[in-house]
Image: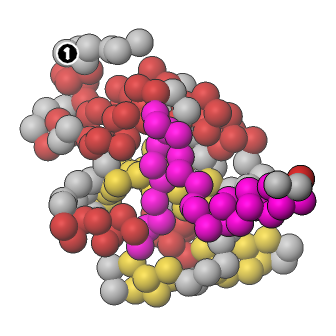
């Protein structure tokens, strides 16, 4: 087959098949996908609220969310959602349609503002319970070992029965 034919077949194959995340990566969902999955199997929702220009968001992607132990925990215990705080598409959540609100050269999505309690700090991760109720927003960068501890506390439901101070003394770090 000529090189042009090989390239055409390769290009078609790449377009026809969605790119799957590598095994060990966080299987990010949209909020709509997470809500649909939660109809069949209840799990808490984890939301990474970020912006494209946020340097610490990129560091957290590269150093925290790419860690295999963190990815496994997020994939097994949560429906993990990536949410761009400056996306312009409307989002329906809990019976409300949230919109992008432009302000000068930038803006913010109403859902990001609601999830962050109008404290627009990036990165902020948000833990929601199985019914999409707020458990905890957590602003700032967290390295993999620190984040794993926090995510396990919420993902395994420990927050329902024990205080953080007491639970963290029993935490067994996989790092």
Q: Which residues are magenta?
A: 4-32
Query: Would residue 7 be visible to someone looking at this image?
Result: no
Q: Residues within 10 Å of mark 1 (few under 14, many from 20)?
A: few
Q: Report the colour scheme.
A: secondary structure
As for residue 18 lying within the magenta part, the answer is yes
Question: SS for tag 1?
Answer: loop
Q: Position of residue 118 (x, y in %)?
A: 54, 65
Expressed as whole percent of the image width and height from the top left, the position of residue 96 reads 40, 86
The one nearer the camera, 8 or 44, is 8
Q: Quadrant of residue 40?
A: bottom left
Q: Residue at x 33, y 14 (%)?
A: 173
Residue 52: x %, y % from top left: 73, 55
Residue nearer the viewer, 143 or 21: 21
Q: Is residue 94 visible?
A: yes
Above or below, 127 against 116 in this view is above
Tell me the quarter of the picture where residue 71 sits. top left
Q: Which residue is mark 1?
A: 170
| Residue 109 shown left or right of residue 25 in the figure | right
Is 64 magenta? The answer is no
Residue 147 appears in which quarter of the rendering? top left
Taking depth in this image into account, of 63 and 54 the one nearest to the observer is 63
101 left or right of 96 in image: right
Q: Is residue 77 above or below residue 44?
A: above
**Count of numbered circles in the view:** 1
In percent of the image, x 66 and y 61: which residue is there? 13
| Residue lying at the far front of the rendered structure | 1
Q: Where 90 falls versus 10 (above or below)?
A: below
Q: Is residue 20 above or below residue 131?
A: above
Farthest-out residue, left:
161
Residue 157 % position (x, y): 18, 41
């Amino acid at each position: 087959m000529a090189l042009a034919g090989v390239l055409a077949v390769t290009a078609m194959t790449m377009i026809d098949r969605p790119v799957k995340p590598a095994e060990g990566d966080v299987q990010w969902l949209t909020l709509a996908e997470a809500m649909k999955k939660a109809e069949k199997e209840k799990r808490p929702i984890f939301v990474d609220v970020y912006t494209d220009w946020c340097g610490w968001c990129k560091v957290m992607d590269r150093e925290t969310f790419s860690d295999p132990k963190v990815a496994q925990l997020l994939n097994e215990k949560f429906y993990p959602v990536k949410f761009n705080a400056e996306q312009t598409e409307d989002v329906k959540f809990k019976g409300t349609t949230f919109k992008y609100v432009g302000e000068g050269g930038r803006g913010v999505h109403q859902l990001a503002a609601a999830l962050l309690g109008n404290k627009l700090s990036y990165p902020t991760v948000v833990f929601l319970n199985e019914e999409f109720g707020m458990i905890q927003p957590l602003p700032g960068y967290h390295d993999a070992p620190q984040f794993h501890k926090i995510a396990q506390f919420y993902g395994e439901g420990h927050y329902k029965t024990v205080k953080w101070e007491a639970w963290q003394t029993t935490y067994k770090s996989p790092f």
